[in-house]
Image (cartoon, rainbow, N blue to C red):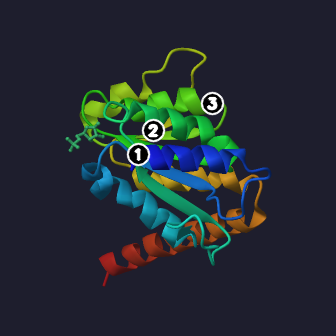
Amino acid sequence: TVPDLIDRLHEEADLKPPTATTPEVGIIMGSDSDLDTMSGAHDALDRLGFEEQTDFQDPPEARFTYETYVVSAHRTPELMYAYGEAAADRGLDVVIAGAGGKSADLPNMTASIAYPLPVIGVPVQEKSVDSVIGMPTGAPIVAVDAGKSFNAALSAVQILGREHVELRDRLHEYHDALVSDVARDSRDLHD
Ligand code: RP5
């Protein structure tokens, strides 16, 4: 239940130091109807060797992990507040937050609550862009274009990569594979 989850987030935030099972990346979205769009973030993180952490008790096999929750700014504001407030103390390094509709407030509110933890906002639809990026001076959010959750995850790994050389290497490998794909596509044009 939402109250149980709020309690668990606070308990985890109180642990010093954070447990090894806390993911580096938190992915939240306003509704399960956002999952189709937000699954691009899963795809990118899986591609870069991250594992989804679904159970706080089990130590993950992968060195780097992410978690996913539905957190609604309007239906569960208490959960949004608890998630943002506990994020850094739990050990998250970056949050990717997606929401759709014209009142796409989850990314911008989470950015304010979790500050100075970086929050990358994903507008789920074109009409959500202004709501996600329209922050007042002094209250920043990093954001991608509508639907670009894959790129949001790459940006999250870039942020983590400043601390972890292993992730920088993985980003280089990913980029090299992209370059090879482009070269192959060009060859295919002439076959
Ligand atoms: C937003 O409202 C959510 O992020 C979602 O994109 C949109 C519609 O939500 P549902 O009515 O499909 O749950 O807050």
Q: What residue appears at the point 68 percent right and 64 percent down from the top-left corner? A: 167
Q: Name the amino acid type tagged 1.
A: Val
Distance in Å between CA atoms under marks 1 and 3: 23 Å
Q: Say if residue 154 shows up in the picture.
A: yes
Find residue 2 and name its label: 1
Q: Looking at this view, is 39 or 30 the one in front?
A: 30
Q: From the image, state whether disc 2 or disc 1 is nearer to you.
A: 1
Q: Splitting the image into 4 quarters, where does residue 114 fall? A: top right
The residue carrying mark 2 is 79
Quadrant location, ligand no. 1: top left
Q: Is residue 130 above or below residue 178?
A: above
Q: Name the amino acid type tagged 3.
A: Tyr
Q: Splitting the image into 4 quarters, where does residue 86 fall? A: top right
Tag 2 and tag 1, C-beta contact below 8 Å = yes
The residue carrying mark 3 is 115
Q: Is residue 78 above or below residue 156?
A: above
In terms of sequence position, does the residue under pointer 1 or pointer 3 come before the other? 1
Q: Is residue 119 left or right of residue 30?
A: right
Q: Secondary structure at mark 1?
A: helix
Q: What residue appears at the point 47 percent right and 52 percent down from the top-left corner? A: 151
Neighbor class of circle 2 (other Cα within 10 Å; few <14, some 14-19, many 20+) is many
> Residue 165 at what x, y percent from top left?
77, 63
Q: Looking at this view, is 101 or 176 the one in front?
A: 101
Q: Secondary structure at mark 3?
A: loop
